[in-house]
Amino acid sequence: YSKEEYDELIPRIIKHMNEFPYVNKEGIVYKYGEFFPIEFSPFSYNESLACEEFPMGKKQVNEKGYKWHEAEEKEYSTTIESDKIHLDIKDVSDDIIKEIIACPNKGQAETKCTFRYRIMPEELIFYRRMNIPIPKYCPNCRYYERRKWKNPWRLWYRKCMKENCNNEFESPYAPDRPEVIYCEDCYKKEVY
């Protein structure tokens, strides 16, 4: 489209979308400018970040009309328990990449545990280069362990903790947390 055609067409599209909005099966109306309805998503609820931030079980997801993906069971057996792997990476042989390692969480639903995992050759090279031991847990369990350290998707009103400063602002750190919170100006004075 030329700029003139585009400028003429956009208001017509917006008007049409507002006069004839999409309405889903629950009766929710989607006019121009709203996010896509969930039924347009190519992903199931339990495959998205929404499931991590707003957890719901399969029954709740189905009641809301969202898609749920059943993970397929993979048939392979473990060849080594994770507690049998050497803690020092220098003692781990190249044969570790041929092993299927059992995760200690044994399929825990909260962490979407994969039961078993393998070490890839590039991964082994990285662990050796960085002098890091072979992980004892599957990638999903490690991911959920890291998520515990993430700040929540919420902000609290806080006051600068520097003496004689009355600045107020929003912070992802709750008032009961031990971190010292400064406003931007006090932080810069403290650091620089």
Image (tube, rainbow, N blue to C red):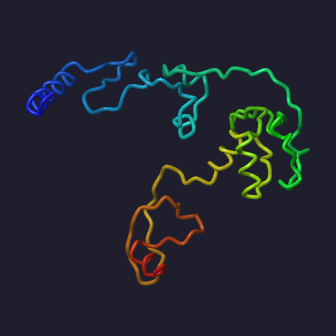
The image shows residue 141, relative to residue 28, as above or below, that is: below
Q: Is residue 181 left or right of residue 46?
A: left
**Image quadrant containing the N terminus:** top left
**Image quadrant containing the C terminus:** bottom left
The image shows residue 178 at horizontal and vertical percentages of: 60, 68
The image shows residue 163, relative to residue 18, as above or below, that is: below
Which residue of the protein is positioned furthest toward the top in this rendering? 25
Which residue of the protein is positioned furthest toward the right in this rendering? 84
Q: Name the residue rendered at 69%, 36% in the picture.
A: 110
The image shows residue 64 at horizontal and vertical percentages of: 49, 22
The image shows residue 16, relative to residue 7, as above or below, that is: above
Q: Name the residue rendered at 77%, 58% in the picture.
A: 131
Quadrant of residue 23 in the image?
A: top left
The image shows residue 92 at horizontal and vertical percentages of: 87, 49
Q: Name the residue rendered at 43%, 25% in the picture.
A: 38
Q: Name the residue rendered at 86%, 40% in the picture.
A: 95
Which residue of the protein is positioned furthest toward the bottom in this rendering? 164
Quadrant of residue 20 in the image?
A: top left
Q: Is residue 20 left or right of residue 45?
A: left
